[in-house]
Amino acid sequence: MMSGCSAKNFAPVVDIYGQEARQTKVTSGTHHVKKGETLYSIAWRYGWDYRELARANNIPAPYTIYPGQRISLALKASPSTPSKPAPSTKPASPKPSSPRPAAKPDKPAKPAPAPKPVPDATATVGPITWRWPAAGEVVETFSSSSHGRKGIAIAGRANSPVAAAADGRVVYRGSGLTGYGNLLIIKHNDRWLSAYAHNDKMLVKEGDAVKAGQQVASMGSSGTYRTQLHFEIRKEGKPVDPLRYLPKQ
């Protein structure tokens, strides 16, 4: 995993394994908004609750931000002033390449077995009724250590269904967070969010309302070395152990 930028005005980027040696959220520096980022994804990256980050930067609901805007990560933040995004440059035309010899056709592959359905058992913890986001073996578990995994890893076959773990609304869809690959973040209420990383196909878009058990993606290996789902639950911006909330298996 790549560590974050160490420039004076930028806070470090933290990946799913908590590679920055820290126990709490980043509370210094600024983040320059890039195209495709949302306040939710920035809050997720730096360990903030999105509402607290919005208040620190005087950003009212529905928390619209713009490329080039500076988001302060200081606890006592002053109002941020959007800066003009850098002008786009026209990409250079690719140079023509010499033709490659035709590859020999591969032998037909045996059809893969059908993926297992997502378990439909539920568990209600507080205001949220949770269910498993995918079928498969939990191959890595949550760790509260600074370098530990901030969720669980569920192994599975490519294109197996990934389902919403609870009712909610999609607040982020993208691949801009280090170590997550194709990522979905679902907001369940003002305190709870869940994340689904390393997807292949993503079947919902930002703003979509989803129901528990609804397929939102297919399992893949984006941003990692094997087919798996990295799943996180966060309460007020803080990662918690998903196995404490999901139904027993």
Image (cartoon, rainbow, N blue to C red):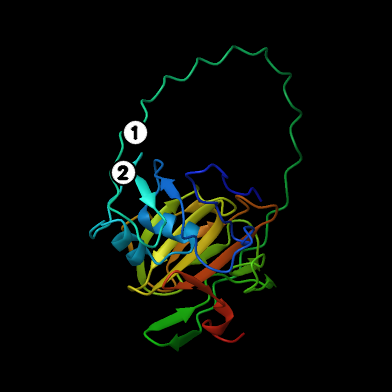
The residue under the point 65% across, 73% down is 143
Q: Is residue 210 visible?
A: no
Q: Position of residue 189 (x, y in %)?
A: 33, 74
Nearest the camera: 178 or 167? Answer: 178
When the figure is inspected, residue 231 is found, relative to residue 29, above or below; the finding is: below
Three-letter code for the amino acid on which mark 1 is drawn: Pro
Q: Which residue is mark 2?
A: 66
Three-letter code for the amino acid on which mark 2 is drawn: Tyr
| Residue 114 found in image quarter | bottom right
Nearest the camera: 147 or 197? Answer: 147
Q: Which residue is mark 1?
A: 85
Q: Position of residue 234 (x, y in %)?
A: 47, 71
Q: Which mark identifies residue 53?
A: none
The residue under the point 29% across, 42% down is 82
**Residues tagged 2 and 1 counted as in contact (Cβ below 8 A):** yes
Nearest the camera: 96 or 64? Answer: 64
When the figure is inspected, residue 100 is found, relative to residue 137, above or below; the finding is: above
Query: Helix, strand, or loop for circle 1?
Result: loop
